[in-house]
């Protein structure tokens, strides 16, 4: 008979991306919020940085009726907090903390961190200080709220901290409020990402790398130190996939206690006639922009492919995607015209006025615009890896080219000036997406793709790709809706050829075969709903609560002696 899990009475969860849309962690937290809010109504409080003072935050709405007693006490304690609700499904409570005042005592905070947990902040630079002051403020807010509102009548309280940026707060809570069970989730190790981003072979030599030594070599000592010591000192250490768990075991010297895979909610995916209409709208929008930019007419049979994500040229496989498209240009087996998008936010300057004018006219043009490679101007056109690649290999989108490549270097938030359409409302129009990642702890972009019934290509070095292979019991193929290519430290060229061949193969699929692949993609997505993955969070809560209870019992026993 299985043991009964301890259930939280209250959950705090902090992240730099609470009400602050930066990357994949925002998606993790914001989509999971509804499931947790349903299970623990208004017993979960998200804590994020207050970066919007004096400006309206569209992701958050202040509610001055919430926790008025605590608000007053927090102010007396020198905490500047704003309380409201996160504008995501479930509308959970979200507290934004102002951390600016703590910079004045930064050295004292770091000294205590060294004395208590051995965290080395001496080599801090860049965003380490800002993240740490936020994390400290979040920890102080948790301590204050617990003492004011929960102590004495809420026995099972959780504090979950996400990424190294919140490690300091987790350690603060561990020391100052030992009754609270602490969980630390690393979505990617800072040192693993740095090894991969610096073009060092991560996987073949993973067993031989020493995390502390590599942190020194790559000037990552402080980030690595806070991440490592938090992992070792919290009640429950977690990560998001088995591929990253191996990394944690080697580079942090601590395997995860529980693996928390990333799910999603499907309520943002349209259905039925609305799905068909949205897909048609997306395809029309993409084709209209491409025709205006390139002065080329596309028929309805054009195959639209894309990649997207953070601009990590090697880690996200952007360079490999470009190489595969370049090889596809000369592929005699390619039977359809391909329109390929690179949707990766870069140092964007402004939307192109010449392209805006063409789109506004509604006319058809037979000549391309100057620089028919991108939809928005960049601040440094001469120092961009995607543009550099296209210039180097003469990928100027000539009329006779079977593959046309367009760089969309901005956030697709619906207000970019060219598409003016949110990312999901364009994603649905794709025929195939390609994410050939080298370093990808989970991989939300391929999961989002299959959620919108768009088959994708990814690699076994992504957490999502590894999970798909486990789900299917073999390597995923195009017909399954997710093709999982085997990528290593050294087979770049072979993978580029495999993607080139897969593009050609998909282009030759019959309508029936394409529809089956789309259905299979959606079926895979169904397995990744939060209703299926939330069980791992409950296991982590139980694990952390048991450790906290054990710690408090030992402390109580020692006090009686």
Image: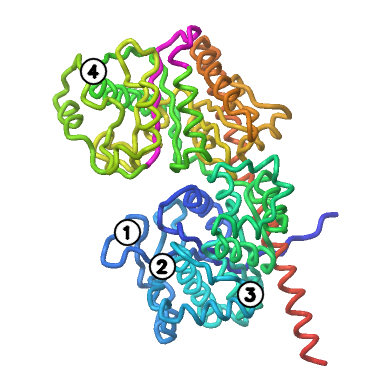
Quadrant location, the C terminus: bottom right
Whether the residues at callouts 2 and 4 have beta carbons within 8 Å, the answer is no
Which residue is farthest front? 217
- Residue 400, compared with residue 36, is above or below; it is above
Precedes in sequence: disc 1 or disc 4: 1
Is 294 placed left or right of 385 in the picture?
left
Quadrant location, the N terminus: bottom right
> Where does label 3 land, which residue?
174
Residue 275, image quadrant = top left
Tell me the CA gap for discs 2 and 4: 48 Å
Whether the residues at callouts 3 and 2 have beta carbons within 8 Å, the answer is no
Precedes in sequence: disc 2 or disc 4: 2
Residue 217 belongs to magenta span: no
Image coordinates of residue 139 in percent, x first then y, are 53, 73
Marker disc for residue 96 = 2
Image coordinates of residue 346 in percent, x first then y, are 36, 42
Whether the residues at callouts 2 and 1 have beta carbons within 8 Å, the answer is yes
Secondary-structure class at tag 2: strand
Marker disc for residue 57 = 1
Chain part drawn in magenta: 328-345
- Residue 320, compared with residue 462, is above or below; it is above
Tell me the CA gap for discs 3 and 4: 61 Å
Secondary-structure class at tag 4: loop
């Amino acid at each position: 008979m299985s043991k009964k899990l301890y259930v939280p009475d209250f959950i705090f969860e902090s992240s730099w991306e609470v009400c602050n849309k930066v990357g994949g962690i925002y998606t993790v937290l914001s989509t999971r919020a509804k499931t947790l809010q349903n299970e623990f109504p208004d017993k979960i409080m998200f804590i994020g940085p207050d970066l919007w003072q004096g400006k309206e935050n569209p992701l958050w709405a202040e509610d001055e009726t919430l926790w008025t007693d605590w608000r007053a006490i927090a102010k007396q304690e020198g905490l500047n907090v704003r309380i409201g609700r996160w504008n995501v499904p479930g509308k959970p409570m979200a507290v934004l903390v102002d951390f600016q005042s703590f910079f004045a005592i930064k050295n004292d905070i770091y000294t205590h961190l060294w004395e208590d947990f051995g965290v080395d902040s001496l080599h801090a630079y860049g965003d380490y200080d800002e993240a740490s002051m936020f994390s400290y403020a979040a920890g102080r807010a948790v301590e204050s709220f617990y003492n004011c509102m929960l102590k004495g009548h809420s026995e099972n309280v959780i504090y979950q901290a996400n990424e190294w940026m919140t490690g300091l707060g987790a350690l603060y809570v561990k020391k100052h409020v030992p009754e609270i069970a602490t969980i630390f989730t690393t979505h990617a190790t800072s040192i693993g990402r740095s090894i991969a981003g610096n073009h060092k072979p991560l996987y073949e030599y993973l067993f031989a790398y020493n995390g502390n030594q590599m942190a020194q070599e790559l000037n990552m000592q402080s980030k690595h130190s806070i991440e490592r010591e938090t992992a070792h000192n919290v009640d429950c250490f977690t990560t998001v996939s088995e591929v990253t768990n191996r990394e944690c075991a080697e580079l942090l010297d601590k395997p995860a206690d529980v693996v928390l895979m990333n799910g999603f909610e499907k309520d943002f995916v349209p259905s039925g006639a609305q799905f068909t209409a949205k897909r048609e709208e997306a395809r029309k929008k993409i084709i209209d922009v491409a025709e205006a930019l390139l002065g080329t007419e596309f028929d309805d049979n054009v195959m639209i492919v894309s990649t997207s994500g953070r601009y990590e040229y090697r880690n996200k496989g952007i360079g490999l995607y470009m190489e595969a498209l370049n090889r596809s240009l000369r592929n005699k087996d390619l039977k359809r015209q391909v329109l390929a998008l690179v949707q990766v936010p870069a140092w964007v300057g402004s939307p192109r006025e010449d392209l805006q004018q063409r789109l506004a006219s509604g006319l058809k043009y037979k000549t391309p615009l100057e620089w028919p490679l991108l939809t928005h101007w960049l601040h440094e056109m001469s120092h961009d890896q995607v543009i550099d690649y296209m210039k180097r290999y003469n990928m100027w989108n000539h009329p006779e080219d079977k593959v046309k490549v367009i760089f969309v270097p901005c956030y697709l938030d619906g207000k970019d000036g060219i598409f003016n359409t949110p990312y999901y409302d364009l994603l649905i129009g794709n025929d195939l997406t390609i994410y050939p990642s080298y370093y990808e702890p989970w991989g939300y972009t391929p999961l989002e793709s299959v959620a919108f019934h768009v088959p994708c290509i990814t690699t076994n070095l992504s957490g999502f790709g590894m999970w798909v292979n486990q789900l299917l019991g073999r390597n995923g193929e195009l017909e399954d809706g997710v093709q999982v290519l085997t990528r290593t430290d050294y087979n770049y060229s072979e993978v580029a050829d495999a993607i080139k061949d897969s593009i050609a193969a998909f282009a030759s699929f019959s309508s029936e075969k394409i529809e089956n692949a789309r259905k299979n993609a959606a079926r895979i997505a169904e397995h990744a709903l939060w209703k299926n993955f939330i069980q791992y969070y409950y296991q982590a809560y139980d694990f952390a609560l048991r450790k906290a209870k054990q710690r408090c019992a030992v402390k109580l026993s020692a006090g009686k002696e």
